[in-house]
Image (tube, rainbow, N blue to C red):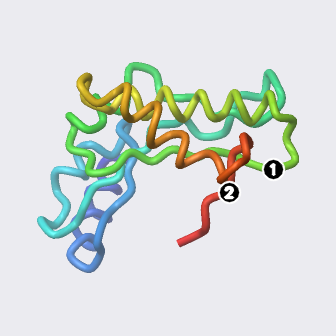
Amino acid sequence: MMEEFKILVSEVLTPHASAILLDPEWGLPASKRRAKNAGLLLAYEKTGYDKTGPGRLGDLLDHWSARRLKEAGADCVKILLYYTPFDPKEINDQKHAWVERLAMSAAPTTSRSSLSSSYMKKAWTRKGSTSPRRSPRP
């Protein structure tokens, strides 16, 4: 029933949308029924977060990677990162490494080192700072 619902939503709404966000567990059939003009964002994390430690680190879906989501048709991979500048540095460092691993898993092998050393530093640090920064909301 969940797959059928998502298929109907995709068919009805994507002709009027720039993209649709779906999960790979129940949404892949709906992704095939979206309008040609609509992009596809696939979620990479489970609902909720790991409650065994501090910092609200998301749990990733089993059997999926950013590369596999891309191969399933995703134009974009969606992750939810709980971030607060008030977390201790070691928690934010752990989150930085988590996001870096996600980015590395989707990058072509030839560009992995440049992605890690260049993009991630720019994405996570302010000039002269070593702490992650909050990105502006769209």
Query: Which amino acid does the dot numbered 2 rest on?
Result: Arg
Crowding near the residue tagged with mark 2, few <14, some 14–19, many ≥20 C-alpha atoms within 10 Å? few
Q: Nearer the viewer, residue 133 or 66?
A: 133
Q: From the viewer's perspective, tell me whether residue 79 is left or right of residue 112.
A: right
For residue 36, the mark is none
Q: Earlier in the sequence, mark 1 or mark 2?
A: 1
Residue drawn at 26 percent across, 38 percent down: 70
Horizontal side of 122 relative to 2 (left or right) equals right
Q: Which mark is drawn over residue 134?
A: 2
Residue positioned 60% across, 28% down in the render: 97
Q: Amino acid at mark 1?
A: Pro
Residue on which the image places disc 1: 85
Residue 47 lies, in percent from the top left, at 59, 40
Given contact means CB atoms under 8 Å apart, are the residues at marks 1 and 2 in contact? yes
Q: Position of residue 96 (x, y in %)?
A: 63, 34
Q: Could you say which quadrant of the image residue 55 lies in?
A: top right
Q: Residues within 10 Å of mark 1 (few under 14, many from 20)?
A: few
